[in-house]
Amino acid sequence: MTTNVFFTYMVECADGTYYTGYTTNLDRRIRAHNEGKTGAKYTRSRRPVKLVYYEEYDNRHDAMAREAMIKKLSRQQKEKLLQGIDPSKQA
């Protein structure tokens, strides 16, 4: 039995915006975003992108739930997350 690792990640696009997603292979996914072929439609016109943040999960459900949570954050909250302050865990 193979153990998969799932990643929730955030990239910074060339226009300064952030895109959040999940994957099982970070290198391949970032490459796909930058090639503009199989990456997300959002990033296609905002290349190149650079990986600025990621978290590892043992299962797809947790990775997808975290992706959804991060996507709901404001830009300011995302920047706090990049600084190591998780706004979703603050009271």
Image: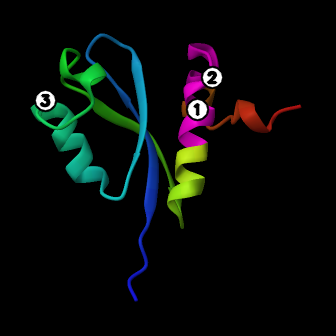
Rendered position, 53 above or below 3: above
What is the magenta range? 66-79
Q: Amino acid at mark 2?
A: Leu
Contact (CB < 8 A) between labels 1 and 2? yes
Report the label total. 3
Q: Residue at x 64, y 21 (%)?
A: 77
Q: Amino acid at mark 1?
A: Ile
Residue occupied by mark 2 = 73
Q: Residue at x 61, y 16 (%)?
A: 74
- Secondary structure beneath dot 2 equals loop
Position of the C terminus by quadrant: top right
> On the picture, is 90 further left or further right than 53?
right
Rendered position, 33 above or below 4: above
Q: Nearer the viewer, residue 80 or 67?
A: 67
Q: Quick check: can you spot residue 83?
A: no
- Secondary structure beneath dot 3 equals loop
- Which label was assigned to residue 36? 3
Residue occupied by mark 1 = 70
Q: Which quarter of the picture shows residue 66? A: top right
What is the crowding at mark 3: few (fewer than 14 residues within 10 Å), some, or many (at least 20)?
Answer: some
- Secondary structure beneath dot 1 equals helix
What is the crowding at mark 2: few (fewer than 14 residues within 10 Å), some, or many (at least 20)?
Answer: some
What is the crowding at mark 1: few (fewer than 14 residues within 10 Å), some, or many (at least 20)?
Answer: many
Q: Position of residue 12 (x, y in %)?
A: 36, 25
Q: N-terminal of the two: label 1 or label 3?
A: 3
Q: Residue at x 69, y 36 (%)?
A: 86
Q: Residue at x 63, y 23 (%)?
A: 73
Q: Quick check: can you spot residue 90?
A: yes
